[in-house]
Image (cartoon, coloured by chain):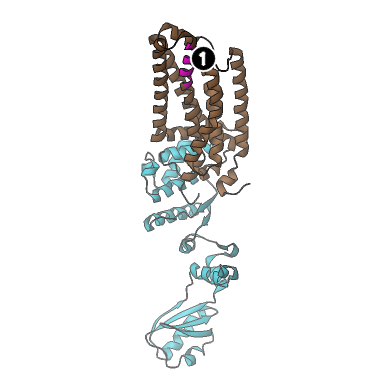
Amino acid sequence: MSFSWTRVRAISVKELRDYRRNRFVVGTMTVLPLLFVILPLIQVFDAYAHVDSSNLNRHVGLSMLYMLLIPAFLPSTLSAYSVVGEREQGTLEPVLITPIRREEFLVGKALAAFVPTLVLAYVVFGIFLAAASLFAHPVIASAIYSGTHVLLQLLFTPLLAGWGIWVGIAVSARSADVRVAQQLSILGTLPLLGILALMSLNVITVSAGLAVGLAAVLLAIDLLAWRAVAAMFDRERLITGRSA
Amino acid sequence: MPESPGLYLRLTVMENLQCFAGLYELDGVRGRIERALRAVNLEDRAGDQCRALSKGLRQRVALARALLNDPAVLFLDEPTSGLDPVASREVHGLIASLRERGVTIFLTTHRLEEAERLCHRVAILNTTLRLIGRPDELRDQLFSRSLDVRLRSPLDDANAVLGALSGVEGWKQAPSGYTLAVSDPEIAAPQAARALVGAGADILSIAESRHSLEDVYLELIDEDVEARRR
């Protein structure tokens, strides 16, 4: 049986419809981006008055780090629900007895978390850039576009989201409780976020080439994580409670 | 179809069925969904969110979902579990209509009257398979055939009347009359009626004893040493 995008689409569309009517998800998707666009804008608008030129780059980096929290937290929260949530609701069994392959199931779930996250994160980043360009002091605006700040955002937003999703699904497949899964999956994204924080704050100085290289490494890790999660996804155990 | 309907409660009936039509990669999805909904009498609830449906209606949606890919064989696990009598009756009707359409149905149930009503063949499991066959065959295997005789008043000399009947292998007193062990009720019943009338008895009824599947099950479990230990 070959990989079917029809089945992937069926899972993704179902997930997106479910998210749309889930108050917790809608709330998280509204509040989190709002919070992470307002906070960095306040910091950027406030920067010229309080920050000396030597620390400006670090200050801008910190402001923009807020926006990386969206791809870190949002998809891991959503995907942490994906398996254990369905198992709690009793909806997993009917899906897993259809001809769906585990890779299709996982990609369907991952896309449903990935697409809205990416859209939200980039929209928020776009709003930030537009507002900073229009209303921030020219020195600040120029600091935003200098260095690797924008590149880091563009490159690492989808990769961080990918990592969060696979950690979330992996934890979800092994958890017995949704809340535990959500907390553990957020915890799982922190190491990567820590490295990005060091890069954004110029503790680790990265050139554009190094940033692209690191992104390539993270992409490879994301792909490996997908294969690892697919391998540990034991549909027999999820249906019957026993390993295949 | 599992015991719990397992529907996405925030999705509508239509959206649930669309999802599963996609998972089965079915062609002509709209027509199939309409046919499945018609089969379970839910055409007018297609746009309702599943959380707004009663448990019985959810069970019908789950049946519609199971019918989407026109299965030749259907496994139903406790399809009436937790349903009220009206909803159970509706589900029974649906199962019977599927059976008439030629769908082979494996029904798992603890409700023996449900199995007796719906199933051509019954398998009784208690850790392992204990017995399998048509309900009548199971009854014949475990119980000797008998006639229940109800009289207005007891016979003065029952042994003289009942013991002399050629088709009767034995008899015993019952609360409202007598139970006759017979090999063939169709031969023994007229003989017994003639003898009882001849003895001056007022007959209220003569009927073959009906053992339910529950009697079969209890008899079987009673024989089961392993079950008694538990």
Residue identified by numbered label 1: A149
Query: Which residues fall within the magenta stretch?
Result: A55-65
- Local crowd size for mark 1, using a 10 Å CA cut-off: few (<14), some (14–19), many (≥20): many
Which chain appears brown? A
Above or below, A164 relative to B9: above
- One can see residue B26 in this view: no
Chain B colour as displayed: cyan
Residue at the spot x=50%, y=27% of the render? A72
**Local secondary structure at mark 1:** helix
Residue B3 on the magenta span = no
Quarter of the image with the N terminus of chain A in it: top right
Q: Determine which quarter of the picture holds residue A217.
A: top right
* Residue B29: percent from left, percent from top: 48, 36
Question: Which of the chains bears the disc numbered 1?
Answer: A
Q: Which x, y percent locates residue A78?
A: 48, 33
> Does B214 sit above or below residue B107?
below
Residue at 40%, 57% in the rendered image: B89
**Quarter of the figure with residue A159:** top right
Picture residue at 45% right of the left edge, 79% below the top: B148
Q: Main secondary structure of the magenta part?
A: helix
Visible in this render: residue A168? yes
Question: What amino acid is at disc 1?
Answer: His
Vertical comparison of B4 with B110: above or below:
above
**Residue nearer the viewer, A53 or A135:** A53
